[in-house]
Image (cartoon, grey):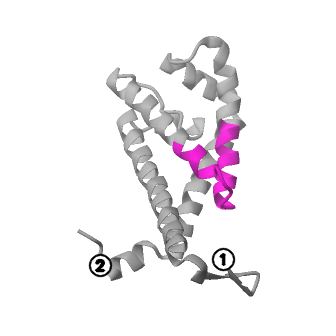
């Protein structure tokens, strides 16, 4: 059953796309920066999951937050590959949280800063939050796909604004 024209217009509104992109980018920049401020505490959280060998924990404690920040900045700037990096990290985070919830681990999710340890959510709540962010990333993919479809179906007639002048593709 196709969407009504009104619903499609609202869902594919450019500002909704930008807002979702910026929100997801800011969340990743914040989360990565908070973990980079205290990599030792984040390494402790990673080791509590028991999924990574001990020699990889320090590498993950520095590399993963740096990748989060870079991908978040890339998403803010709408750079190619940044959405794919964020999508892959969200899948990985969801799998790790699911593993922790299934095994009944009573630990911090490691999602944001270590100051949140005192008020940490359950792993299940963190998993739900990640699934919402994953749905947001899927929306961004859907939006991009719909725009590509519109450009390809218009062929040579597609016209858009670029640097205040009309460009035909």
Occupied quadrant, residue 160: bottom right
Query: Which disc is residue 57 wearing?
Result: none
The question of residue 45 being in magenta is answered with no
The question of residue 81 being in magenta is answered with yes
In this view, which residue lies farthest toward the front? 156
Residue at position x 70%, y 30% in the image: 62
The quadrant the C terminus occupies is bottom right
Q: Main secondary structure of the magenta part?
A: helix
- Magenta segment, which residues? 65-87
Task: Report how many numbered discs are placed on residues in the image.
Answer: 2
Q: Is residue 87 above or below residue 117?
A: below
* Comes first in the chain, label 2 or label 1: 2
- Nearest to the observer: residue 48 or residue 21: 21
User: To which residue does mark 1 refer?
Assistant: 169
User: To which residue does mark 2 refer?
Assistant: 4
- Position in image of residue 103 (x %, y %): 35, 20
- Position in image of residue 19 (x %, y %): 54, 68
Disc 2 to disc 1, how far (Cα)?
Answer: 28 Å
Occupied quadrant, residue 157: bottom right
The quadrant the N terminus occupies is bottom left
- Nearest to the observer: residue 94 or residue 8: 8
Q: Secondary structure at mark 1?
A: loop
Is residue 59 at all visible to an observer of this figure? Answer: yes
Residue at position x 69%, y 54% in the image: 73
């Amino acid at each position: 059953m196709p969407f009504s024209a009104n619903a499609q217009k609202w869902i594919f509104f450019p500002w909704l796309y930008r807002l979702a992109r910026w929100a997801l980018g800011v969340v990743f920049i914040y989360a990565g920066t908070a973990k980079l401020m205290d990599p030792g505490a984040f390494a402790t959280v990673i080791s509590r999951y028991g999924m990574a060998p001990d020699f990889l924990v320090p590498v993950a404690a520095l590399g993963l937050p740096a990748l989060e920040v870079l991908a978040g900045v890339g998403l803010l700037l709408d750079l190619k590959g940044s959405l794919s990096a964020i999508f892959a990290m969200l899948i990985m985070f969801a799998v790790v949280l699911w593993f922790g919830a299934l095994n009944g681990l009573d630990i911090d999710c490691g999602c944001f800063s270590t100051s949140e340890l005192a008020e940490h959510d359950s792993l299940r709540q963190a998993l739900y939050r990640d699934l919402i962010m994953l749905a947001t990333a899927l929306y961004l993919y859907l939006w991009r796909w719909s725009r590509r479809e519109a450009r390809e179906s218009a062929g040579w007639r597609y016209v858009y604004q670029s640097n205040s002048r009309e460009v035909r593709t």
